[in-house]
């Protein structure tokens, strides 16, 4: 009798452990990887069609002399999946916060009133916060592996100091506010589900 109870208990625990599988995901954004930015995302199933995702990234090194692309950023996100969590279509709401130190990035981009070409000749250091909405899709590659694409649009408020050149410390503006509307999340994630 005790043996039957013990076997029933072990089978119940194993079943519960196996049914809890596919509740967590660990991910890396391949786009950030290509820019030498260390990043990690963790996703947790809240319900059948809801998940919570927290991603963060960090870049603290100089890629080439005369260019600054240093930053850290965190992006919590709540996702609603069309069918089941971790597969198919999803929509999301995300927040964003971080700090940056950018400069010496050659470009001629002027996007929706934001003149990114100033990054060619000046250095900007400050913080940012905002949020947005996103759409994404996850392809199941294997039992524990997914590929996920996501595009988010939203608003970012930033306050920065502007410096005369990339390498010098001569500050020419302090505490300058700016507003940005546009893409706030672009991701191609490789996800391990467990």
Image: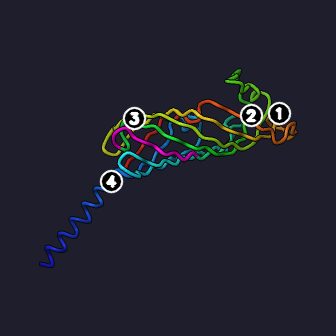
| Residue 103 image label | 2
- Crowding around mark 3 (Cα neighbors within 10 Å: few <14, some 14 to 19, many 20+) is some
Q: CA distance from mark 3 to mark 2?
A: 37 Å
* Res. 75 image quadrant: top right
Q: CA distance from mark 2 to mark 4?
A: 44 Å
What is the secondary structure assignment of the residue under circle 2? strand
Residue appearing at x 82%, y 33% in the figure: 165
Going from the N terminus, do you reach mark 2 or mark 4 first?
4
Q: Which residue is mark 3?
A: 89
> Magenta residues?
75-84
Q: Nearer the viewer, residue 142 or 76?
A: 76
Q: Nearer the viewer, residue 72 or 19?
A: 19
What is the secondary structure assignment of the residue under circle 4? loop
Up the image or down, 10 lies above or below 46; here it is below
- Looking at the image, which residue sits at the far bottom? 2
Going from the N terminus, do you reach mark 4 or mark 3 first?
4
Which label lies toward us, 4 or 3? 3
């Amino acid at each position: 009798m005790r043996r039957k109870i013990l076997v029933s208990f072990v089978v119940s625990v194993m079943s519960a452990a196996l049914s809890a599988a596919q509740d967590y995901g660990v991910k890396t954004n391949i786009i950030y990887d290509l820019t030498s930015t260390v990043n990690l995302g963790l996703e947790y199933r809240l319900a059948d069609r809801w998940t919570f995702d927290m991603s963060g990234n960090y870049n603290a090194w100089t890629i080439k002399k005369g260019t600054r692309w240093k930053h850290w950023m965190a992006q919590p996100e709540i996702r609603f999946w069309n069918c089941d969590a971790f597969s198919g279509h999803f929509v999301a709401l995300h927040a964003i916060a971080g700090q940056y130190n950018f400069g010496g990035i050659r470009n001629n981009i002027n996007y929706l009133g934001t003149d990114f070409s100033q990054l060619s000749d000046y250095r900007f250091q400050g913080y940012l916060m905002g949020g947005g909405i996103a759409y994404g899709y996850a392809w199941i590659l294997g039992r524990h592996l997914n590929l996920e694409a996501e595009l988010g649009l939203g608003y970012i408020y930033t306050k920065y100091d502007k410096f005369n050149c990339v390498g010098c410390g001569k500050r020419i503006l302090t505490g300058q506010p700016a507003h940005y509307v546009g893409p706030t999340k672009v991701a191609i994630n490789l996800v391990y589900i467990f």
